[in-house]
């Protein structure tokens, strides 16, 4: 069985929670939050209404190789949190909790990603690369969020 990994990030966004949550719960903004090197594209036709059970199809390109990705919104609590999980895609397991809380100076956004790599017992060998890539993606995301709420 592959090992489980976790990535956590928090960011203070200088805006009220309702506005920040609205930005994150708009699926089209995923393209703004994803670095260009992934060539991220939403395949699902708009409008995408975020609610428990919503399915969203994407495509990314990693080193020129197209990868299809399907997620489902598992839970959605307006202005507080939502969870997306991977149904098919590059990970063996993907569970991304997005949380939004009031904080002095704005809204605290907390991302907790639990994931598992494909490849069974050999997966830990690739984790060094995957971890670095995820950190780059979430570093880009941090900057994109800061720009969006300047």
Image (cartoon, grey):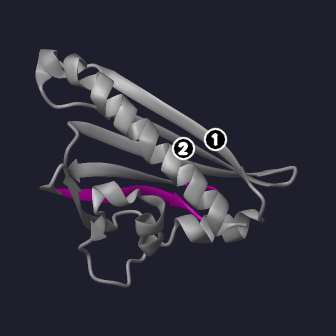
Q: Position of residue 20 (x, y in %)?
A: 66, 65
Q: Position of residue 122 (x, y in %)?
A: 14, 17
Q: Residue at x 27, y 49 (%)?
A: 86
Could you tell me which secondary element the residue under label 1 belongs to?
A: strand
Q: Which residue is mark 2?
A: 111
Q: Earlier in the sequence, mark 2 or mark 1?
A: 1
Q: Residues within 10 Å of mark 1 (few under 14, many from 20)?
A: some
Could you tell me which secondary element the residue under label 2 belongs to?
A: strand
102 is higher (above) or lower (below) than 23: above
Left or right, 39 with respect to 9, comes to left
Q: Which mark is residue 23?
A: none
Whether residue 79 is visible to the viewer of this picture, yes or no, is no
Q: Quadrant of the N terminus?
A: top left
Q: Write down the quadrant of residue 92 in the picture.
A: top left
Q: Which residue is mark 1?
A: 10
Q: Is 47 a magenta residue? A: no
Q: Residue at x 60, y 49 (%)?
A: 99
Front-lying residue, 149 or 57? 149
């Amino acid at each position: 069985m592959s090992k489980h990994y976790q990535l956590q990030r928090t960011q203070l966004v200088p805006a009220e929670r309702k506005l920040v949550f609205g930005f994150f719960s708009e699926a089209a903004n995923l393209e703004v939050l994803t670095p260009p090197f992934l060539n991220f594209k939403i395949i699902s036709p708009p409008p995408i209404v975020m609610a428990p059970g919503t399915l969203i199809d994407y495509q990314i390109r990693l080193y020129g190789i197209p990868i299809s990705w399907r997620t489902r919104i598992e839970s959605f609590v307006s202005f507080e949190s939502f969870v997306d999980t991977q149904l098919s895609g590059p990970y063996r397991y993907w569970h991304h909790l997005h949380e939004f809380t009031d904080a002095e100076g704005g809204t605290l956004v907390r991302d907790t990603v639990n994931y598992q790599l494909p490849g069974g017992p050999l997966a830990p060998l690739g984790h060094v690369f995957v971890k670095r890539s995820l950190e780059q993606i979430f570093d880009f995301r941090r900057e994109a969020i800061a720009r969006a709420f300047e």
